[in-house]
Image: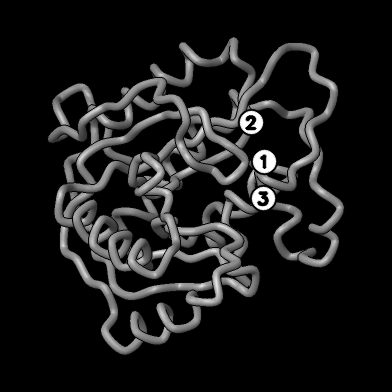
Amino acid sequence: MRLPVSILLAALPVAVHAQPSESYNIYAIPSRPVVEAVAKVSDTLAEAGMTSFHRQGHAVHATLYLTRFPTSAESALKAAVARIARCQAPFAMQVNGIEVTPSNWVFLHVQPSQALQRLADTVTLAAEPLRDHSVEAPAWMAAYPDKLPAFQRYGSPNVFMQYQPHLSLLADEKSPELAAFVAAAQAQPPQASGEVTGIGIGVTDANGQIVRTLAEYPLQAPGKDCVTP
């Protein structure tokens, strides 16, 4: 079962920290065609009385790794992500269709790809040593024992084999118009062909949306100082 990282963070109990920590989202930055697809769907939602994250002013992004980090780790985290971006060329991103969870979180589906999976894996491995290791798994994760080992090791259940890329539109939507919107979107699924053009780091709210951008780095063609695994 899909467990969006944003849902995880909304329910995540925060332990008593030896130093301040915040929820940081390390995310893939999509190109204009993908952003325009989100904007178009957001316009349709607005016509039905629903306000998407995009309409609320949050940046369109695809989460790569989201967990809590000590604020003291910010400089090291920026340096690690900058190195990854410097050694990764832009690559294709395909959007095809709508996804809705049982609790009415709504996403545009991002087609999984080797390039996107590899980027998420690389970011997770680089950032995980810097994370806040005092955060404990929420009680509701007892219902998903297969995801618990990933959370305990990486601070997120949605990494590696559990990674499912998406673009968030709505959270816990209560509108009675949602069912009609979903039916129409499934009949004519939103689609877009674009690219991942950069990696960003941002502080998030309880829904995993960016409320303060810490840094964004454009993807670049790997140079001679990049080591290929």
Provide the residue designation for mark 3: 8
Residue, x 56% and y 61% (percent of image)? 162
Q: Is residue 62 above or below residue 18?
A: below
Residue 96, position in %: x, y?
29, 73
Q: Give coordinates of residue 48: x percent, y percent.
A: 39, 70
- Left or right: 68 in relation to 59: right
Q: Amino acid at mark 1?
A: Gly
Q: What is the C-alpha distance between the residues marked 2 and 3?
A: 11 Å
* Disc 1 target residue: 155
Going from N to C along the chain, the mark reached first, 2 or 3, is 3
Q: Amino acid at mark 2?
A: Arg
Where residue 197 appears, x then y in whole percent? Answer: 20, 41
> Local crowd at mark 3 within 10 Å, few (<14), some, or many (≥20)?
many
Marks 1 and 2, the one that precedes in the sequence: 2
Nearer to me, 135 or 211 = 211
Which of these two is toward me, 29 or 221? 29
